[in-house]
Image: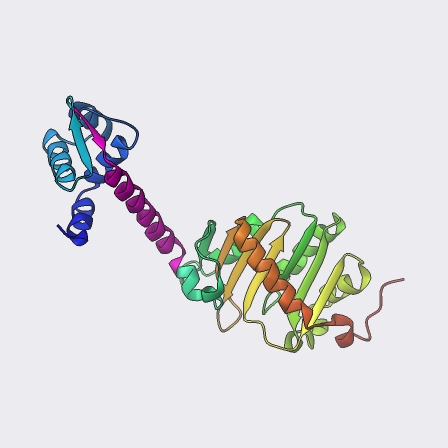
Amino acid sequence: MDAREGIDFLAGSDGRIAVLRELAEGPCRPCELRDRTGASRTAIHRALSGAEEYGWVRKQEQRYSLTGAGRHVFRKYEELTTAVERGNRFSDFLSAFGRADDLPFPFDGDVCVSTPTEPQAAETFLFERFPANADRFRGFSPVLTQRLVDSFEPTIEAGTTVELVYSEDFASHMQDSYPGMVELAVSSEGVTIHVVPDPIDSGLALIDGEVFLKAYGSHGDLRACLHSADADLFEWAAGWFDRKSSDSVPLSRYTEGVRPPG
């Protein structure tokens, strides 16, 4: 029997992998497997007979147990199932996110993708998960929304250090579009805005140990958002932010006429 036949055997019925899962916990009688899996007598018999034929289980004194090969196959099948489930869960986000090929996938996290019927879903997801109190906020995005500007003032008043990066093209008209944000950047010691020469097409927010990755549409609409506390992903994102901000100039170069109040 070749590998494909074995894969097809396991994939052919949820009950077969359920039997292996129970046997991974210890030897069982067929009646115990029926009780634990809810499968019929016939299904249990077929699962055990097939697994025994593949050399994955053995029978000793009316009890069945996994062989070494059976444990290996079960473990790898579970890993494959987890990988497929994770891939399916993140597929829409990865398709929308411009730096997907650079990400340290796989990782854990939650995602939300906007749809034509729920165009604000990703933005709502983002703001619902923003920590209320944080020590440090770092991020960049191709656009700045009034909702984000409004959220910064109480965040800064609470003592959060804010460090942002925007493109030169966006910064050149930030004073006209978002004067309140410019005033915050000029008047608060806790706010730093960097300006970089290259366009920014994706979004990132690092809030203490959490990371938000954002995918935008061609009109600056937030299409998808990922939220994670995965350590490897956070390390990657922090490095991305550092590289992005390293080739920057201060916002004051574009807002020479703005001075701190008082």
Q: Quadrant of residue 204?
A: bottom right
Above/below status of 132 relative to 169: above
Which residue is located at x 74 percent, y 71 percent?
251
Quadrant placement of the C terminus: bottom right
Q: Is residue 203 magenta?
A: no
What's the magenta region? 63-91
On screen, residue 192 versus residue 67, left or right, reads right
On screen, residue 229 versus residue 49, left or right, reads right
Q: Quadrant of residue 141?
A: bottom right
Q: Position of residue 258 (x, y in %)?
A: 81, 71
Is residue 120 visible to us here?
Answer: no
In the image, farthest residue toward the left = 42
Q: How is the image coloured?
A: rainbow
- Camera-side residue: 251 or 153? 251
On screen, residue 92 versus residue 63, left or right, reads right
Q: Position of residue 112 (x, y in %)?
A: 45, 55
- Camera-side residue: 147 or 14? 14
> Most prominent secondary structure in the magenta stretch?
helix
In the image, farthest residue toward the top = 61
- Camera-side residue: 258 or 107? 107
